[in-house]
Image (cartoon, helix red, strand yellow):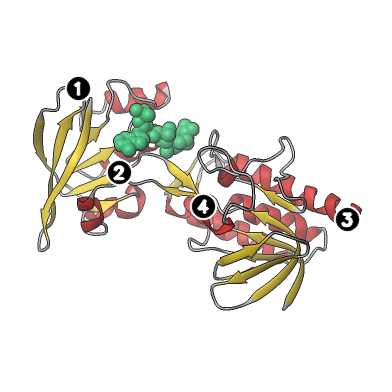
Amino acid sequence: MEKRRCLIIGSGPAGYTAGIYTGRADLKPLLYEGEQPGGQLTITTEIENFPGYPEGIGGMEMMEDLKKQAVRFGCDVRTGYIKEIDLGSRPFHAKDDHGGEIEAETVIIATGASAKWIGLESEKQFYGAGVSACATCDGYFYKNQTVAVVGGGDTACEEANYLSTLCSKVYLVHRRDELRASKAMQHRVLTNPKIEMCWNSRISRILGTEMDGVTGIELEDTKTGTKSEREVTGVFVAIGHQPNTAFLAGQVELDAQGYIKVNNPSSATSVPGVFAAGDVCDPNYRQAIVAAGKGCVAAMDVERFLQSN
Ligand code: NAP
């Protein structure tokens, strides 16, 4: 059994920042990268709003830099994910996906959040064959084609704008008659000649064949129930995210949406010695800079906790 003073679960900006700080505090942290090493930012092209990069930086590049910085200070970054954890008593016991077992005096949970799906059978059928949750990752495959984006928030608008630079036409399908996105983002979408709004609409079926992949969508008017079809070759689902907390099996207090409850402004969870940072406990801001800041908070909380416990 491997013994550690601090186990960090997750490798987004929160996890790596916690790694940098606990590393510099000589706690020799062990960090598990998780199923998506580098987190959600690795599927973003350009980050323009992280202070310190006046020309912007690629998401993958930034996460590689954060990882290098954490490793430089002695953070042990490990490929794989924590499958199971027992937070019933300290030290805590965790099992990874390779059969490894860790005994940790403290834990920082920074597992982030994952994309939500509409829940259609046809969505599952065409996943990876015309259905995607990441325009940045898959948009390239739809160059000069017509695609649909689902959602009315900042993510959907950002994806629609991005796709309009590659595709010949983008339908933005939203279930209401008003976008949830910020005014600036709304303006960009509503004045983009390549984007056509499908207001009060939901996708009731994704059409296609096994050989051709996606060929269209069936839309249902959310007010009248009237159905119509659009020809598209790609469907991008951008309806929000859910926090990655299933592996905790209810051992830490969560809010109604499944986000970890922390004792703000600290990162303390309902279990003494267990801290959380980043999107896994933040349904509101979901920004890299906020997650990084909270990773620092969690690391400092761990240091103080270890001094007094
Ligand atoms: P969001 O703000 O929660 O928006 C989700 C959208 O999907 C809403 O318009 C919602 O409709 C719709 N939706 C939810 N479930 C649906 C379903 N089952 N079927 C159809 N539509 C559904 O999520 P988000 O856009 O991912 O943004 C999350 C947070 O990140 C926000 O705070 C946002 O400002 C931030 N963000 C910021 C940036 C940026 O600043 N550049 C970029 C991306 C995200 P309703 O409106 O009807 O509820």
Residue matched to label 3:
309
In which image quadrant can residue 267 be found? top right
On screen, 246 above or below 96? above
- Amino acid type of the residue tagged 1 in the rendering: Lys
Residue 66 figure quarter: bottom right
Q: Position of residue 259 (x, y in %)?
A: 56, 42
Dividing the image into 4 quarters, which one contains the N terminus? Answer: bottom right
Q: CA distance from mark 1 to mark 2?
A: 18 Å
Is the C terminus in the top left, top right, bottom left or bottom right quadrant?
bottom right
Is residue 309 rendered to the left or right of residue 281?
right
Q: Which residue is mark 1?
A: 223
Residue lying at 58% horizontally and 66% vertically, measured from the top left: 82
- The residue beneath circle 2 is 118
Which class describes the residues within 10 Å of circle 4: few (<14), some (14-19), or many (20+)? many
Residue type, mark 3 in image: Asn
Compute the Cα span from label 3 to label 2: 45 Å
Whether disc 1's CB lies below 8 Å from ligand 1 is answered: no
* Count of numbered tags: 4
- Point 35% across, 49% down: residue: 134
Labelled disc at residue 99 = none
Locate residue 92, reporting x and y percent: 72, 64
| Mark 2 secondary-structure assignment | loop
> For numbered disc 4, what is the local secondary structure?
loop
* Residue under label 4: 244
- Say if disc 2 is inside 8 Å of ligand 1: yes
Q: CA distance from mark 2 to mark 4?
A: 18 Å
- Which quadrant of the figure shows ligand 1? top left
Contact check, label 1 and label 4, Cβ < 8 Å: no
